[in-house]
Amino acid sequence: MDSEWNVREPLLNVQQVADYLGVCKRTVYNLRNEGNFAPGTKIGRKVMWRESVLKAWLEEATEAPGESAVYKFRSAG
């Protein structure tokens, strides 16, 4: 078994993700539906996110001067 899986990282629900990003839940849902958001893990009917995945998405989506973060993320995936 991979040692990475031995570390239990808490999963964040949509409200916790919205709070973390400083946006409303609807924004998180909209970004996800548009394919412009960090990949989540579906558990039953809920989608949950690992904080490490969210942080990696933020790093990749961070704008450089004159560049759109949304466009950058769309074109990367």
Image (spheres, grey):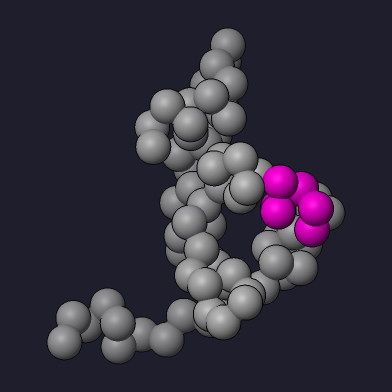
- Residue 54 picture location, percent across and down: 53, 57
**Residue 4 position in % (x across, y down):** 27, 77
**Res 55 seen here:** no
Q: Is residue 70 left or right of residue 28?
A: left
Q: Quadrant of residue 6?
A: bottom left
Front residue of this view, candidates 29 and 1: 29
Residue 25 in sight from this viewpoint: yes
* Residue sitting at x 54%, y 34%: 62
**Is 28 placed above or below 73 here?**
below
Q: Is 69 drawn above or below residue 49 in the view shown? A: above
Taking the spot 42% from the left edge, 86% from the top edge, the residue there is 8
Position above or below: 25 against 63: below
Left or right of residue 19: residue 39: left
- Which of the 4 quarters of the picture holds residue 12? bottom right
Which quarter of the rendering shows the N terminus?
bottom left
Q: Quadrant of residue 25?
A: bottom right
**Residue positioned 48% across, 26% down in the render:** 72
Quarter in which the C terminus is drawn: top left
In the image, is residue 49 part of the stretch drawn in magenta? no
- Residue lying farthest to the front in this orientation: 45
Q: How many marks?
A: 0
User: Bounds of the magenta span?
Assistant: 25-30
Q: Main secondary structure of the magenta part?
A: helix
> Taking 15 as reference, is 60 above or below it?
above
Expressed as whole percent of the image width and height from the top left, the position of residue 71 reads 53, 24
Q: Residue furthest top?
A: 66
